[in-house]
Amino acid sequence: MKKGVMRPGHVQIRVLDMDEAVKHYTDLLGMIETDRDDQGRVYLKAWTEVDKFSLVLREADEPGCDFMAFKVVNEEALSQLERDLVEYGVEVEQVPAEELKDCGRRVRFSVPSGHAFELFADKKYTGKWGLSSVNPEAWPRGLQGMKAVRFDHCLFYGPELAAVYDIFVNVLGFHLAEQVLDPEGTRIAQFLTVSMKEHDIAFIHHEEKGKFHHASFFLETWEDVLRAADLISMTDTSIDIGPTRHGLTHGKTIYFFDPSGNRNEVFCGGDYFYPDHKPVTWQAEQLGKAIFYHDRVLNERFLTVLT
Amino acid sequence: MAGFQVLNRTTGDRFTCQDGQSVLKAMEQLGLKCVPVGCRGGGCGYCKIRVLEGEFECGKMSKVHVPPEAVEKGEVLACRIYPLTDLTIECVPLPEAALAKQTTTKSLR
């Protein structure tokens, strides 16, 4: 957080059918619908999140991710980061306050991997869902499905990882927590953090620009991940792989798809990060184990099925 | 016999698809692998096939992978088509997926 970027704030995902998507993200993941706007977008949050929304769904004829946004500590930091981006040669676009309801102004920019990101400082504080901020109970009743705790991170696929690294690390103050290096020492995967989490965002090398691999949501326990797997079967939801463990980050995980083919992850555990930690390196020759610690072999679908 | 017969002319596989069931789901349930399985949601384009004979209904599919002119040529996603008659299908090369595979292999050695 050394430059004031605090945490993932929201992600806007394109879906082919809004009703099916809302049902998936509420009934199955357990997120809570908090609003809709006149563009037809639907706003959702997970129950522990204090701001009004972390997931925005937009109906479109092509699934994928429109942008991911990070919340910064205050307006002063936002202005400084904006100047730093411009000075570094990154083109920024101003998105006025209220373009997303109850969200302040956003600074939008694209990185050479072909993905769009935003920074913002203000969003309506609604508090944890179903809990008082004074003498709060352990958890709220009435949560659905997997009872997702929070929107945690995204993984994007695209080219030019080194240029993306420079922007996130040198301009925005992220740290490199984990990486995959090929035998020549070229970084083909980078897991970046602004927090104590092992990743707030990750990139894997891919020739085609702007591809979306998954949006991930946090669960508390391995039992919760198993229960998520049960719910995926009960609802006949398209599964990708899991439950299993990653070598990278050591998180315990399961992957599945929303009704438009966007990949979701729910996971628990994983390593933690402090700024004095040196990056963890996985060798590309061990990529099977790095991604799926138990199978230790690559799954073609995990590497090539993207939106 | 209930359902519709699907013949994959590329691989020679035949399977039965129940009324209201997608071609991909019918294939998967029988343990066949004659069409690649991706997201199963019309989004990733992995299960693209060409329908040579027969009638079907379509669910929503990503326009990037299936533009309207492709649908007219019978190029659709197996996860999003529901037969109305027996079907003959064939696999179509996936330039994008093939490229991705090649790239991955190259960058990982």
Image (cartoon, coloured by chain):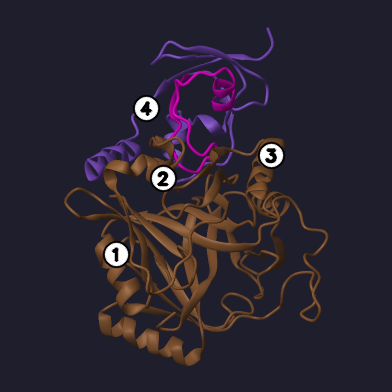
Chain colours: A brown, B purple
Residue A52, x across and y down, in percent: 67, 74
Amino acid beneath label 4: Val
Three-letter code, disc 3: Asp
The residue at the far bottom in this view is A76
Q: CA distance from mark 4 to mark 2?
A: 29 Å
Disc 1 and disc 2: Cα gap in Å? 24 Å
Span colored in magenta: B24-52
Distance, label 4 to label 1, CA atoms, is 31 Å
Mark toward the viewer: 3 or 4: 3
Residue at 19% x, 55% y: name it: A185
The residue tagged 2 is A291
Q: Quadrant of residue A170?
A: bottom left
Badge 4 vs badge 1, beta-carbon distance below 8 Å: no
Which numbered marker is on residue A112?
Answer: 1
Q: Residue at x 26, y 60 (%)?
A: A160
Based on the picture, tell me whether residue B42 belongs to the magenta stretch: yes
**Residue picked out by circle 4:** B92
**Residue A137 at x, y percent in the picture:** 81, 70
